[in-house]
Amino acid sequence: MSYFIDRRANAKHKSAVNRQRFLDRYRTHIKRSVEEAVNRRSITDMERGEKVSIPARDISEPVFQHGPGGRRTIISPGNREFVEGDRLRRPEGGGGGGGGSGEGASNQGEGMDEFAFSLTREEFLDFVFDGLELPHLERKQLLDLEEVRPVRAGISRDGVPSRINIVRSMREAHARRIAMRAPIRRALREAMEALEAEERKDPVLRNPARISELKEEIARLERRLEAVPFIDTYDLRYNNMTNQPMPSNKAVMFCVMDVSGSMTQSHKDIAKRFFLLLYLFLERNYEKVELVFVRHHTAAKEVDEEEFFYSRETGGTIVSSALTLVDEIINDRYPPAQWNLYVAQASDGDNWDDDSTTCRELLLKSLMPRLQYYTYVEITPHAHQALWEEYETVADRFSSRFAMRQIVEGSDIYPVFRELFKRRVQQ
């Protein structure tokens, strides 16, 4: 068994391992502080770190010490109850003796001093998106050759030194040496037997010329044996690698936001914060998730990230224009056989008469059969309108892939977001 010890210095001489253990130990306290920070932050400062406070009593560690057992001899200067090193109990409020009832004192006789430390940006986002995932993400087979990986495809005579197959090369070299040296060894053995037979003859019958000839032949054959190389370039074999298309979990998220006149500035800010959380979550956790931003009032338009979050365009409300645009973009650029398709929609529920029925038909007949997941958040403190009622029909039909939630105020954003994208147990 081998052990690898990382002795690289940490930033500012801090132990990254100990810090990670600390974060794991007090995860509950930290997650509570992170949730509070998410609810109170504005749109533009979601990616910075956070200062976290933990009550000091919650970070106390157990200690071992000797108990009062055994025999001991003490001298009590004026009392038999306390000895040096004993801790005095805090007097209850109103008892005098320097332990009177202060205005900030606890009714349990202990303070609430807090241990404060700062989370880095990466640590903060780790806690924000802990336990979240894109639901129903499937591996799609790509038709292009951009998504490939090198795989072993046998042995080749040509290749680069880094892919040389030593075992096969040595096996080829050994076989070549056997094949090349076998006839030479056979001829050498025959020559040595002939020399031995000639030398065993009677001195009168020996042929000195024949003996000299055989010795020269033996020396020549031995030189040929030594000249056979141990390994030759002909023996080299290389691992052959070929590019194989690989399945991918590529996904696209359509962010659809209502910017009509019925959406107040407060509603738009809540919608932007919801989509900003979604944007950070996707960018951080998925390398191959594309984002498509769609804004709509009476007409829908595909925009970039900057315009989606900061444009002040407004107008009437026709929700079906956005769904129609999403359907067209899917047909043009994102074949369902190659892409996981997601849609997140935020609206106040207001829509023109009879258009909600059109939205329902678009979802049932065109979009939902191709989508992995559809989330709809309605930002309103009032009763639901026709759009919500029509979407309930879609939710009944596609219960596992269509989710609806209501957001009343900013504090609801993070809980709703976690509920929509929480990691679910695979059936």
Image (spheres, rainbow, N blue to C red):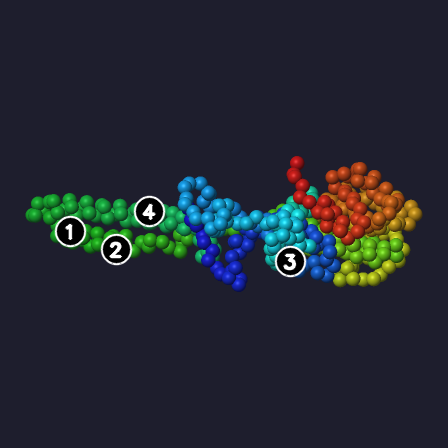
Q: Which mark is residue 398?
A: none
Using the numbered discs, state the Cα–Cα distance from disc 3 to disc 1 in whole angstroms. 100 Å
Tell me if 55 is positioned left or right of 275 in this view. left
Disc 2 secondary structure class: helix
> Which residue is at a point 45% across and 57% down the rendered structure image?
161
The residue at which mark 1 appears reads as 211
- What kind of element bears circle 3? strand
Point out residue 349 in the picture as x, y percentages from the top left corner.
Answer: 85, 48
Residue 381's x, y, as percent?
A: 84, 48
Q: Is residue 315 left or right of residue 344?
A: right
Please tell me which residue is depicted at 16% across the width and 51% down the height of the picture: 210
Q: Are marks 2 and 4 in contact (CB under 8 Å)?
A: no
- Mark 1 belongs to which amino acid? Ile
**Residue beneath disc 4:** 178
Q: Which residue is mark 2?
A: 223
Label 3 vs label 1, nearer the camera: 3
